[in-house]
Amino acid sequence: MTSPASTEFVPPQLSAGPRPAQGPAADEGLARRLRALACTAPLHDLDARKANLAGEYSTYAMAEVALAAIDLVTLNMDFDTGADHEQIVARLLPRIAAQAPQRPAAEHERVARWVLENLINVGSVDRGFRAVYGTFGTDGVYVRRDYDFKLIEEVPGYGGAVYLRTTDEAVNVLVGALDTDVTSAQIAAEVKLEVLISRGRLADAQLAAEQARYRTVQYAETLRRTLEATRRNVRAVDWLGAVPDMIDEALDHVADRYRHENAILTNIRKARDEAEDQEHKRRAAELVDIVKDCIRRHTQLQSRLLEAGPLFRAEQDRQAFARPTARSGLDLYGQLVAPVLPLPVEEAIKVTDAYFAHGTGLRAPGAVRMGDLVELLLTPPVEREHLGAEMPEPDLIATPDDSRFSEAQLATAMDLLDLEHDAPRRLSGLLAEARRLDPELPYLVALLAVHAASPPVGTAYRQGEERLLFAVDDGTELDDPEFGGADLIVGTALLDAVGMAADRKDTA
Amino acid sequence: MSDHHAEHADAWSEPDVHETAQPGTATPTGGPAVTPADAADAARLVSFGLQPKLLPARDAEYADLLRRYREEPAFARIADAVATGLGLIVLEVSPRAGMAVTAAEDSVFAVRMGDYARRASTDSGDRFLHGLAHLAVAAMAFPRPDDLADDGYIGRITVNGVDAFVRQACRRLEERAEEQGENTDPATDAPGLEAAWRIYARRSSTGATKDARRLAGSTTGIIGKAVAFLTDSGFLQRTGDEGGGSYRTTARYQLQVRDLAGSAAMAELLDLGVVPVTDGSATLLPPPEGDDLELAADAGLPFHA
């Protein structure tokens, strides 16, 4: 206490002013920070507990892996589903391998799975974490409370698969901006990005762009939940005001961001193309990818928003314009589910128990006779025939090897044709050299050279090949005892695979 | 509906009351005597009723007995008496629902929570979740009072849909608590005072298992168990695999929820003094004033007006 406590008598009507002691309001900020702090505990815990693992795992920085995992899940979360468990493990491996390059790959994978499982907290039935903290209540009594949270949760996806999603808590911990408004934070992040780019500070710009993308994901998640509720029950959602407003707002947001991000994209592209420094160029290219991803997410969001209206009208037709029935029924949601949920669990359980007892129907109890039981217990288990009929052993006939040249000959010929890119050779010389090695070889070399006369440049380029064999006819006649025709110039061309890959990315 | 059936149940136990009203039909004192064969047929009809998945349309004998029940009051009384004696409640006897009977509270046919789910007997949170899952399935299958009242209505649900719907309701409560600045984290030494929605919100909705089955302790696992059980009770029929398994309701389910389960739960809720008193028969289309979840009953209408 820095302010002196007042000893004067305070009239009761003035007690609405400053409160004398730690009230709940004063404690609220503390509680919020305690909860934020608790969210980081599972990460620290990983490093503390790695000593308990069988084996030497102290070289791994578990908290770093965990944070990277949360990053990956957040970035791979789609609008509909979530991130794939195996994919996350696979993408974590390079980082883990870099931490301990001399360790076996199996151990790296074990670390990845261990970290991911611990973030989901597979061992507990809730699959969540709990932290205990204390606050002062309105009556000044100190109460210990449980704070339950999750970092990565498992959600059902298409076809019964299980996907991973980061929770709001995890995103907040990750971004490090607790208790902020989604919309304004995004705007702030993007304004910052623009300024950074205009000043040429790309390293910071990338950080800001990534933050903007986290925000975008978070925003999409909020909208997805609201839209889902709209589909479910027309009446459960306020279609008069809240939802149309929300959709308008979201559409405005999408349009705004789309414009904004396209402008950014143009700017960074320019920065990328004009940048002299290779490092700057690479950074700018990465930034282009991030902003493109943001735009893709916005487009996805927009198409969902446009579907909402027609869906509402269809549901409205079904639900509101049917012929009314003479009887009236019980409003199961409004009269039972909704009032039960806010009750303390020990009271709610009485209602759900009563419903369960009367709502499950009947089960005919199994009546067992002693004779049957004995027989049942003594019967050997039946072999399960789930394997199907036995497969006949296939009768295989070895096909004779009728290829003219052996693998060894091909290898020799390829060696011969593996020319330096700045030293092409005449076909006549190659043939003579081949003849010295093997009398059959000249035929193979000639064949390969003729093929190289019209090399598939486009295909090689697209497949990212770096070298390509080519042959050119410059009019010289071939002087050879076995072959006739043109004495081709055979050489190796180098392809710009890196440039090609960059081009491909751009056009995509 | 339930009054009508209660009439049957009374009819056999107090035959003298109806003696004057229905002379010459089936009173023990007058009219055609009840033969053991009639009793056997009546018991046979009840035994059909105990096989809830059996459809009268698929079984000629069942359909015959149903017709007899509807045409011969004396036979109907014996069948009702057999059912009551076995500890069963007759909900409806009709060609569409068959002999719809359900277990009375202390009957040997009643389903007990401890048999239903092992964890539920020790963990009150699990017990609540299993009960809530059944309630939520019904609420999702009959979203409006009209749907529950309309005999021709067939509800459709998916497991993931029910989970999302309850989660949504929980999330609203969470938002509301946040708006009001409530601290909903329960006191460590009084877990029973934790708000019910938090139990649900805390439980994860799914989880990976080694054998690719649903995680039994997750909310979709709990709801999946409930719908599988209801399917065995002849209350739901599985229609597909989308959304974690999709189902449609049967006439029996509607009867069970409307005439028995809903009112039993309501009575319990009223005992707790939670909702404004209703007798369960009044029209409840608009949710009660000051409803917790701000259900905007007619919010959609101006769009078409």
Image: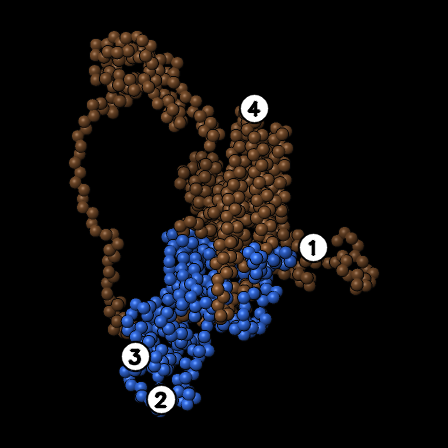
Q: Chain of mark 2?
A: B
Q: Colour of chain A?
A: brown
Nearer the observer, B160 or A508: A508
Residue displayed at 54% across by 52% down? A226
Amino acid on which the number 1 mark rests in the picture:
Ala
Q: CA distance from mark 1 to mark 4?
A: 54 Å
Q: Residues within 10 Å of mark 4 (few under 14, many from 20)?
A: few
Residue displayed at 18% across by 44% down? A393
**Left or right, residue B115 beside residue B199:** left
The label on residue A26 is 1
Kindly indicate whether the residue at mark 4 contacts the one at mark 1 (C-beta within 8 angstroms). Answer: no
The nearer-to-camera label among 2 and 1 is: 2
Q: Earlier in the sequence, mark 3 or mark 2?
A: 2
The label on residue A274 is 4
Q: Chain of mark 1?
A: A
Amino acid on which the number 4 mark rests in the picture:
Glu
Q: Residues within 10 Å of mark 3 (few under 14, many from 20)?
A: some
> Can you say whether A213 is above or below B201 in the image?
above
Q: Which residue is mark 3?
A: B41
The nearer-to-camera label among 1 and 3 is: 3
Residue displayed at 21% across by 15% down? A439
